[in-house]
Amino acid sequence: MNMPIIESGMSFGPFPEGHCFYIEKSGTYKKIEKGVQIAEFLLLRYKTGKPPTVWVIEAKSSTPHPGTLPGFDDFISEMKDKLNNALVLGVAACLNRHSTAYSELSELFKTLDLSTVDFQLVLVIKGHKEEWLPPLQDALTKTLHSTVKTWALSALSVNVMNDDIARSFGLIS
């Protein structure tokens, strides 16, 4: 098991060895980070009879209210950039596009069949009430529409959840 990842006041994991790539703390990201925002980590999950899924996880301790413009729109744009950049950098690492990336990945990530793997783009917000999630879900789904389409992801591949829901998915201990 890996050590838990502490982000935005939440403890993610621990996850089985090799299932997590802490992309935000990786040497690969450190080399390109100027002007490139990125999500916290990638989590590899398996379900019997289905291809593996890579969860791209971004954690936040709060969000602006949907009515506060331009703050809300800026927040959604930032989340789009972080999730999209982590997805792309994760795949680039698996394809050995960066000299340091391949050595940072576990064997499980290195051997992924990228033609069949699925992706989940997930925003976890600490202490957020469930009734506050739908406007964020709608806005993030809308802004990530082109990512979902170009990567041929499921229509349900964008998820906004609070820490209670994340706990029910086994993301938070």
Image (cartoon, rainbow, N blue to C red):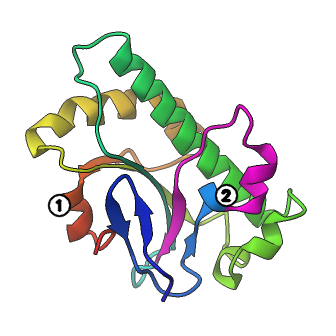
Lower position in the chain sequence, tag 2 or tag 1: 2
State the residue position of label 1: 164
Queried whether the magenta region covers residue 27, the answer comes back as: yes
Question: Which element carries disc 1, helix, strand or loop?
Answer: helix
Instruction: Report the span colored magenta.
Output: 26-45
> Would you place residue 44 above or below residue 55 in this image?
below
Queried whether the magenta region covers residue 57, the answer comes back as: no
Residue flagged by tag 2: what amino acid is it?
Gly
User: Which residue is rendered at x = 21% and y = 14% of the image?
Assistant: 67
Camera sees residue 158: no
> Would you place residue 3 above or below residue 158 in this image?
below
> Would you place residue 2 above or below residue 162 in this image?
below
Percent x, y of residue 22: 59, 65
Residue flagged by tag 1: what amino acid is it?
Asp
Is residue 9 or residue 135 the one in the foreground? 9
Q: Quadrant of residue 35?
A: top right
State the residue position of label 2: 90
Q: Is residue 72 left or right of residue 87?
A: left
